[in-house]
Structures are given as C-alpha cells and as structure tokens.
Image (cartoon, helix red, strand yellow):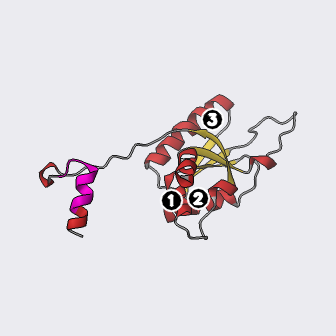
Amino acid sequence: MKNSNYLLKAIGLFLIGSLTHFGLHAQEAYPNKPVRFVVGFPAGSATDVAARVVANQIGQQLGQSFVVENKPGASSDIAARAVATSAADGYTLFILTIANIINESSGKSDFVNVQKSFAPIAMIGSVPIILVASSDQGINTLKDLIAVAKSKP
C-alpha cells in the first residue's frame, strides 16, 4: 500500500526545507549563526522534548545555538507551512510527525505536501501507539473491540 510505505518513510523524520538549495562555501563553516528547530506542538509535548534533546546535542557538537521554536496548531501544519516557506538555507529545520502525514492523507489540498516541501535528514525517534480497554468490558482483542463497536454504534 503506497500510503503505508510513505508513512513508514516519513514518521519521525527530522526535516529541512529544500536541501537542494543549501549552498555551503568552503570558507564558511556551517552553522555560522543560530539554527531554528520548528516544532508544531506546544512546549512540553513529546515532540518538543525530543527536539530540545536533539537541539542541545547538535548544538554542543557544532558549537552553535540550535533554538527550538514552538508553532502549535492545525495538527502541526502551521509549523510545516512556516518552514516550507522559509529560506532554504539550512537554518530552519522542522520536526515532522505522524500528524503531518495524517493532514496530507486527509485529501484536503490546503495542507503542506511534506514529500514535496522537505528533504529527510534523520529519524530522531519513534513512538508506539497502544490501544487499551477496561478489563471489565470483555474486550481482549482488536477483533472484540470492532465487534462491540459495530453492535453498539
């Protein structure tokens, strides 16, 4: 399934807007100014914490400030749009999440097309999703849950 394959490639990727225009000259060290990590969720969220850990580590290794900027809203599309329309100079990075893939797969054309707008750099994490139900409901499997949901719409 095409969407599943795309989803697996995209989840958790740490992205940068258009590396194809990212021009470094031999005499210029990257980064020579602070770099922004744009996160589409509020401070304290799992994505924000991951971004801050990565920003801190990269900043220490490269000797430059990597600043996390939170732009929550629209299931991370506000942040995606801010990065997609920023200068493609390598100084504005984006933390892509499953929310961006869900937005794009919704069929609405007003969401940022992450596949066209960004180039992947690295996967920085993954988050398992676990479905649970109360044990007194008699639901022990996903099949049980579906049966109950169908019987009591």
- The amino acid on which the numbered mark 1 sits, given as a three-letter code, is Ile
Q: Residue at x 60, y 70 (%)?
A: 110
Q: Nearer the viewer, mark 1 or mark 3?
A: 1
Closer-to-camera residue (108/146): 146
Q: Which mark is residue 145?
A: none
Q: Is residue 85 magenta?
A: no
Q: Which mark is residue 79?
A: 2
Report the residue marked by disc 3.
59
- In the rendered image, residue 143, in percent from the top left (x then y), is placed at 26, 52
Q: Are marks 2 and 1 in contact (CB under 8 Å)?
A: no
Q: Which image quadrant: the C terminus?
A: bottom left
As helix, strand or loop, the secondary structure at mark 3 comes to helix
- In the rendered image, residue 107, in percent from the top left (x then y), is placed at 55, 68
Classified by dominant secondary structure, the portion drawn in magenta counts as: helix
Q: Is residue 69 visible?
A: no
Q: Earlier in the sequence, mark 2 or mark 1?
A: 2
How many badges with numbers are in the image? Answer: 3
Q: Residues within 10 Å of mark 3 (few under 14, many from 20)?
A: some
As helix, strand or loop, the secondary structure at mark 2 comes to helix
Q: Is residue 8 visible?
A: yes
- In the rendered image, residue 112, in percent from the top left (x then y), is placed at 62, 62
Q: CA distance from mark 3 to mark 2?
A: 21 Å
Classify residue 104 as left or right of residue 24.
Answer: left
Q: Earlier in the sequence, mark 1 or mark 3?
A: 3
Q: Quadrant of residue 54?
A: top right
Closer-to-camera residue (140/83): 140
- The amino acid on which the numbered mark 3 sits, given as a three-letter code, is Gly
As helix, strand or loop, the secondary structure at mark 1 comes to helix
Report the residue marked by disc 1.
102
Q: Residue at x 47, y 41 (%)?
A: 126
- The amino acid on which the numbered mark 2 sits, given as a three-letter code, is Ala
Q: Which residues are magenta?
A: 139-148
